[in-house]
Image (spheres, rainbow, N blue to C red):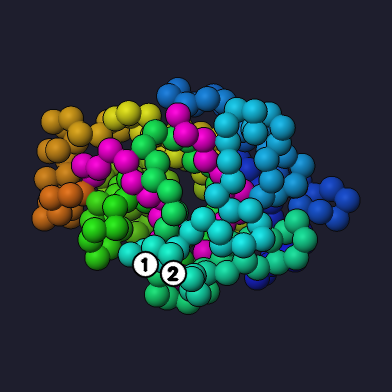
Amino acid sequence: MRQCLGGFVFWASAGTLLVAGGACQKPTPGPVASIGTPAPVAPAQPNTLSASESADGWKLLFDGQTLAGWHPYGKAGAAVTEWKVEGEGNERVLAWTTKGADLTSDDDYANFELSLDWKISEGGNSGVFFHVTEDHKFPWETGPEMQILDDERHGDGKNPKTSAGANYALDPPVDKTLNPVGQWNTARLIVNGDLVEHWLNGKKVVSYTLWNDAWKAQVAASKFKGMPDYGVRKTGRIVLQDHGNFVWFRNIKIRPL
């Protein structure tokens, strides 16, 4: 156990803790995704790309130094004040600090693999949205969400469809391994055409198909039924949710497919 940022931090994947030479290290992610590529081989330092990742077309969405490439939702070009970079040296993380803005990528992505580590605060809630367009008040009016949650303490954890790793309010995760508050979880979101997969700590936990009749019926029977633009976009932005709770991210990287 080592005290790093904002409490005791474990660099963990699939429940495995590694500490070497006084520095926290993350093991290589899990198996091959069925609609993506093998999980990226993690470099020696957080928030960097390995040579193989660079060769395979991965790019960082968080450089470990700045908030370059991000803006507050609905305010393209504006400075971000609600999120900040915390930590020192190679242990910098992207952190939510105060309520007021969902963090939105400057670029749009249609087909992609997104990989990131997240850590949630006690009782906390956040999420990762995709195919978001900034023509509505909230990102969840257009983009589906991969849920981030403290399942043990937050009320949404009682419902599998709103628990960590879920396609929020629609598809529950199956056979997931969730590391608790104070530990990092490694997530992958793969979108390739109409096929979507959520991965959590090396396991595929959710898969679904966008835009077909089953999807439309599922949305029509959900809390999104009054949102005609929900889940219909074929490209859009990546959004990290401001839900009013402390949440931390690192190793945010993406590969267009």
The residue that appears at 50% across and 75% down in the rendered structure is 81
Q: Position of residue 11 (x, y in %)?
A: 69, 51
Relative height, residue 146 to residue 141 (above, below): above
Label pair 1/2, CB-CB below 8 angstroms: yes
Going by the image, does 224 lie left or right of 5?
A: left
Near mark 1 (Cα within 10 A), the count class, few <14, some 14-19 or many ≥20, is few
The question of residue 234 being in magenta is answered with yes
Give the residue type that dot 1 points to.
Lys
Task: Looking at the picture, tell me which residue is in the foreground, 108 or 27.
Answer: 108
The residue that appears at 52% across and 40% down in the rendered structure is 254
Q: State the residue position of label 1.
A: 75
The residue that appears at 39% across and 45% down in the rendered structure is 108
Q: Report the magenta residues as a range.
A: 231-257
The residue that appears at 39% across and 63% down in the rendered structure is 76
Looking at the rendered image, the quarter that the C terminus falls into is top left
Task: Looking at the picture, tell me which residue is in the foreground, 233 or 198.
Answer: 233
Going by the image, does 159 lie left or right of 85?
A: left
| SS label for mark 1 | loop
Task: Looking at the picture, tell me which residue is in the foreground, 21 or 68.
Answer: 68
Relative height, residue 118 to residue 177 (above, below): below
Total numbered labels: 2
Q: State the residue position of label 2.
A: 78
